[in-house]
Amino acid sequence: MALKWNEKFATGIEKIDTQHRELFTRINNLLDACTQRKGEEMIGEVMRFLEDYIVVHFSTEEEFMLKYDYPDYPSHKAQHAKFISEFSELKRRLKSGRISTVVVPTNRLLIDWWINHISNVDKELGAFLRTKM
Ligand SMILES: [Fe+2]
């Protein structure tokens, strides 16, 4: 399993794409660790990275949306909020010590959510921003 950056994920907004590429690298590190049966060691590190990353990255996008009066701001922000709540639930489960039960749902959330989110709403946002910037 791998999550490879591909130009089809590009929004055309350099700051957003740079952050997305960094995210793909981190998620791939976790997937690689899992194939080497080191997922349980790696997952804490990836979760800590994501805690900070999410705050910075979602703020980057939301600031752009506010600055340029993006009409879909509420629904896009709601998707970010949904990710934060699912991520928090995984963190809670991770803290409760059942790491083996968290690795697979974490991988699934990271891959499915981000691919879907970037391919759809982030690309729509990018198309909008490109007409404004
Ligand atoms: Fe987004």
Image (spheres, helix red, strand yellow):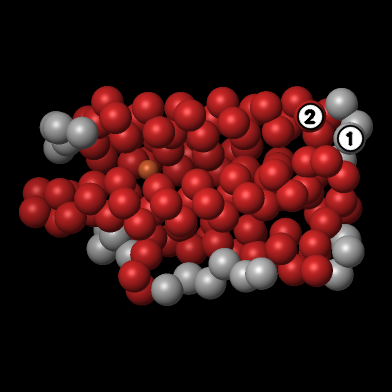
At x 75%, y 68%, the residue is 32
The residue type indicated by label 1 comes to Arg
Q: Pinpoint residue 54: horizontal percent, then vertical percent.
A: 53, 39
The residue type indicated by label 2 comes to Arg
Q: Earlier in the sequence, mark 2 or mark 1?
A: 2
Q: Pinpoint residue 112: horizontal percent, then vertical percent.
A: 53, 51
At x 17%, y 35%, the residue is 70
The answer to whether 64 appears left or right of 2 in the picture is left
At x 65%, y 65%, the residue is 28
At x 26%, y 63%, the residue is 12
Report the residue marked by disc 2.
Answer: 93
Determine crowd level at label 2: few under 14, some 14-19, many 20+ residues with C-alpha closer than 10 A.
some
Secondary structure beneath dot 2 equals helix
The answer to whether 19 appears left or right of 7 in the picture is right
Q: Quadrant of ligand 1?
A: top left
Residue at mark 2: C-beta within 8 A of ligand 1: no
